[in-house]
Amino acid sequence: MINHTANSRRLLLVGGLGTTDLSGKVPRPGLLMLRQALRQSGHDAVIANYSTSLMGRLYPADLVSRSAAIFERSVKPLFLDGKKPLRHPLLAARSLLDIRELKVLAGEQAAVEKNVVAEIGREIVDRVRTERFDAVGFSLFFGGSTVASIRLAESLRAAEPSLPIIFGGPQTTHFSETIFQVTGAPTALVLGEGEQAIVGIAEIIDRLKAGRLDDLSRIPNVVFKNENGRLIATARSRLPNNDWLRLSADAYEEPDFEGVMRYAFIETSRGCPWLCNFCSQPLLSGKLRYLKPAESIVNEMAALNQRFGLTHFELVGSSTPPWQAAEIARALLARGLGDKFSWVAFMRGRDQDTGERDPFKLMDELKRAGAGALFFGAEAADDATLKLMGKKESVADVKTMMLAAGKAGLATMASFIYPYPGMPANEADLIIEFLKAVQPLSAPAQALGLYPGTDSANRANEIGCEIVYPDPHDQKLARAGLKAAATMNSPEVLKYLLTYPLILSLPMRFWPPLPWKIDGQDFSEYVGAVNKLQRRIAELGVLSGFSHSHYLISQVLKTSPRELAAKMFYLSLTGDPKATAGIIEEFNAQATGG
Ligand code: B12
Ligand code: SF4
C-alpha cells in the first residue's frame, strides 16, 4: 500500500531498451521489485518498459519488407530448409548478394535506432516535466540497452541539469568506473540488488537535486562521483531475506502486462555459492545463496493466477537446486495446482545434496507438478574443462539429470561455452557424443564471454584468453612494443565492451569482434568454430538457439519448438513489429484462463 506523505517521491524507471527476442517481451522483474520497494517505503514509481512499445518505430515497414524478402529468398532455403549451396549455385550466388544487403540494412537500422533514441530522449524529458518525476532510473544490460540508456541519460542531463539520474542493472557492477569515464550523465550507479539503494536515494532526493552528492555515501551498493570529483563506492549490502519475500509477494499490477506476454518470471534464489569462473551472478547478487521457500513461490504463482489469470511461469535466479524444485513440485501438488500451471527453470547437474535423491523420481515429480522444460548450463563435455571453469560438477552429473528429465517427458536444453580456453582439441566431438546420449531439445553453443570482474576476466591472459585492443591502430602499437599489452583493465577494452552493440539480428560472424583471442584463435576463427559445431548440432536434429523460455512460449502457442524457432529466426532478422505483436496477442489469448 502506498503511504504518501509530503516527502513522498515519484521515480520513472526505464527498462527494456535494446533488442531482445520473444522471451524478453515480458514485464521486467527487476523494475517491479524496485517499484514495490519504493511503494512500501511511502514513495512511488512508474515503469516505462520499452521492450515492445518501440518496435514499430525501430523497424519501419520499408526495412522490414526488404529483410523479409531476403529471409524468404536466401535465409530460409539455406538455413531452415537445409538446401546445400553446392547443389544450388544460383541460390548460393544470390545469398552472397543478400548477405551484403543485410549488412547495409543493419547499418540503416542502426541509423533509425539512433534517431528513435533521440526522439525517446525528448519524450522522456517532456514526461519528467509534465508528470513531475523526482528522478529517473535506467536498467543497463549487456548490449543495446546500455548504449541507449547512456544516450537517453545524456539528453535528460542536458535538459534537466539537477535531476537525479540513476543507473542500475548488471552492467553497473562490471563497468562502474568505465561508465563515469564515458558519460557524466548519471548522478549515481547502483550495483547489484537495487531495492535498498533506490529507497535510500528517494529519501535524499532534495539534497541530490541541490548537488549534495556526499549524502550518497550513507547508501549501500552505490558508486558516485563526490563533490570533489572522486569516485566513491559504498559498502555492498544484501537485501534481507524477509524483505525480499515481502517485496516479491505482490509486485505486479495489470498495466505491467500492456503489450507484453502474460507470463511471469518468479525469483527462486538470489546469490550463487558455486562461483563458476566465467559467471557474473556471484558478483551481481552475492556468494551466499538465499532461497525462497517453496510455499512463498507457490503463493506468488497462485496470486498471479488469481489477479491476472497467469498460468505460465519461469523460475529465475542463479539456478534452481533440484531439491528446491522438488519442494516447489510438492507444494504445487499438495495444493492441487499440479495440472493448472506450467513452468520452466534453470538447473545444475549437481547441487547440495543432489546425490541423496533419485533423479528419476525427482523428474517425475517435477513433470507431474507442471514443469515443462529444464535448462542446464552444461558448459563442457569433459571433466577437465569443467574443472578449469570452476563448475564443481561433472559431465556425468549433468548427463544423469538430463537423462532423467528426458525420461520423465521434460524438454531439456544443454548450453555449452565453446570454445573455452584449455579445452581438449576434440571437445566438439565430445559435445556431439554427449548430445547423442542425452538427446536434448536444444543445445546453444557460444564462445566464452568475459565480463569484467569475473575470475575468467581477471585471469584472462593466464587462462588462455589473450586480450587485444579493439582498435587495429592500438593493436599495431602494442605489437611494436610502443603501447602496453591490452588487459581487461585497459580503458580502451572496457569502453568498447560497455558500448558493444549486440546485433542479435545477424549471425555472430557479422558482429563487431570481441577483443580477445581464445587459445590463440582470433574472433573470426573461433566464431567459425562455433558455426561448425552448430551445424553438427543441427545435423543431430537438435535446435541451437532455443531456451526453456522459448519452449514455454511454444507450448502456449501450441506450435512445435521447431516452428517457433523458425519464426524467431524470421523475427530476429526482420524485427517485424506486426508479426511480433500478433504472436504476443495469440500468446495472451491462449495463456490466460486457468
Ligand atoms: C530473465 C533473464 C533475462 C530475460 C529478461 C531480462 C531483463 N532485462 O529483465 C531475457 C531473456 C530478456 C534476458 C536477456 C538477456 N540476458 Co539475461 N538474464 C535473466 C536472468 C536469468 C534473470 C533476471 C531477473 O529477472 N532477475 C531478477 C531481478 C529481480 O533482478 P534484476 O533484473 O537483475 O534487477 C535487480 C538489479 O539488477 C537491480 N536493477 C536492475 N535494473 C535497475 C535499475 C535501477 C535504476 C536500479 C537502481 C537498480 C536496477 O535491481 C533489481 C532488483 O534487485 C539473469 C540471471 C539472474 N539470476 O539475474 C540473466 C542475466 C541478467 N542475463 C544476462 C545476459 C548476458 C543477457 C543477454 C545479454 C543475453 C544475450 N546474449 O542476449 C540478454 C540481454 C537483453 C536485454 N536487453 O535485456 C546476464 C547479465 C550480464 C550483463 N552484464 O548484462 C545475466 C546475469 C545471466 C548471467 N549469469 O550471465 N535475460
Ligand atoms: S553458472 Fe550458474 S551455478 Fe555457476 S555461478 Fe553462475 S549461476 Fe551459479
Image (tube, helix red, strand yellow):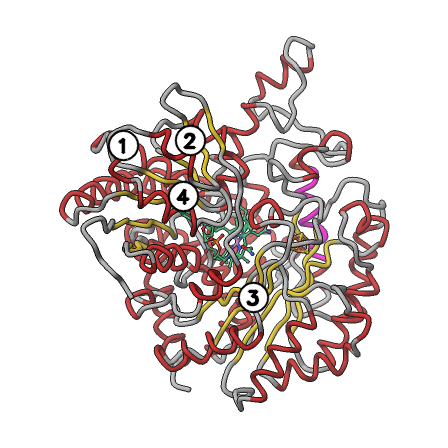
Q: Position of residue 278 (x, y in %)?
A: 68, 44
Distance of label 4 from label 3 (alpha carbons): 41 Å
Foreground pick, 84 / 408: 408
Kindly identify the amino acid type of the residue bearing the numbered disc 1: Arg
CA distance for labels 2 and 4: 39 Å
Ligand 1 within 8 Å of disc 3? The answer is: no
Give the residue type at disc 2.
Answer: Phe
How far apart marks 1 and 2 lie (CA) works out to 16 Å
Q: Is residue 316 above or below residue 17?
A: below
Q: CA distance from mark 3 to mark 2?
A: 31 Å
Which residue bears the numbered disc 3? 268
Q: Report if the CB atoms under discs 2 and 4 are less than 8 Å apart.
A: no
Inspect the image, locate mark 4, and give the three-letter code of the amino acid beneath it: Leu
Pair 1/2: label in front: 2
Mark nearer the N terminus (1 vs 2): 1
Pick the quarter of the image with the N terminus. bottom left
Dot 1 crowding, Cα within 10 Å, few <14, some 14–19, many 20+: some
Asked which secondary structure carries label 3, the reply is loop
| Residue located beneath label 1 in the image | 157
Direction from residue 439 to residue 241 in the image, left or right: left
Residue 168 location (% of width, % of height) = 43, 44
**If the picture is divided into quarters, which one holds ligand 2?**
bottom right
Earlier sequence position, callout 4 versus callout 1: 4
Q: State the residue at coordinates (77%, 74%).
A: 403
**Mark nearer the N terminus (1 vs 3):** 1
Q: Which of marks 3 and 4 precedes in the sequence?
A: 4
Residue beneath disc 4: 105
Residue 67 percent coordinates (x, y) = 41, 52
* Quadrant in which the C terminus is drawn: bottom left
Magenta region: which residues?
A: 525-536
Asked whether, in this view, residue 168 is left or right of residue 307, the answer is right
